[in-house]
Amino acid sequence: MYKILLVADTHSVTDELASALGSINYEFIMVDDGRNTRDAVKTHLPDLVIVDMQVGSMGGMAICLDLRLEESGGRLPSSKVLMIVDRRADIFLARRSSADGYLIKPLDPIRIRKAVVEILSNQKFEDPSFAPTETTPPVLLKNRENA
């Protein structure tokens, strides 16, 4: 069973994450104040920390940077971090803070489960929801070359 630390100041976010993942394979620890994340990691040794970008007392980027700083100083064990971001522009912040992955709101259960499984398998996860798409279908390009 994996331990997941959920850090968000709104219950709707933690409820949505816990509901999407279910309780069969996961044990959840909830933190609603970002300043308590470091102590929760030290106490519970979670396999994954899921952080909402907007936590009133300490934002997701600051939480992730704090965890990375404490890890590099040997004061905390290494933690995998999945950041929940509010908009596409926040992707830069998630990457800059060395998060192992990010999900863009609105969330859905399929992407949540996929992100968690990939990160727990020591992979990075970048939400493809808002990735640029090809404007011209490849079939049309191929037909133009043959003309």
Image: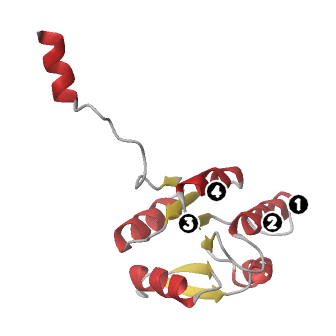
- The residue carrying mark 1 is 73
- Residue type highlighted by circle 4: Ala
Q: Position of residue 110 (x, y in %)?
A: 35, 69
**Spatial separation of the CA atoms under disc 2 and disc 3:** 20 Å
Q: How is the image coloured?
A: secondary structure
N-terminal of the pair, mark 4 or mark 2, is 2
N-terminal of the pair, mark 4 or mark 3, is 3
**Spatial separation of the CA atoms under disc 4 and disc 2:** 13 Å
Asked if labels 3 and 1 touch by Cβ distance under 8 angstroms, the answer is no
- Residue type highlighted by circle 1: Gly
- The residue carrying mark 4 is 94
- Secondary structure at badge 3 equals loop
- Secondary structure at badge 1 equals loop
**Spatial separation of the CA atoms under disc 4 and disc 1:** 21 Å
Q: Quick one: label 2, few (<14), some, or many (20+) residues within 10 Å?
A: some
The numbered dot on residue 66 is 2
- Residue type highlighted by circle 3: Asp
Mark toward the viewer: 2 or 3: 3
N-terminal of the pair, mark 1 or mark 2, is 2
Mark toward the viewer: 4 or 1: 4
N-terminal of the pair, mark 1 or mark 3, is 1
The numbered dot on residue 144 is none
- Residue type highlighted by circle 2: Asp
**Spatial separation of the CA atoms under disc 1 and disc 2:** 11 Å
Residue 114 is drawn in which quadrant? bottom left
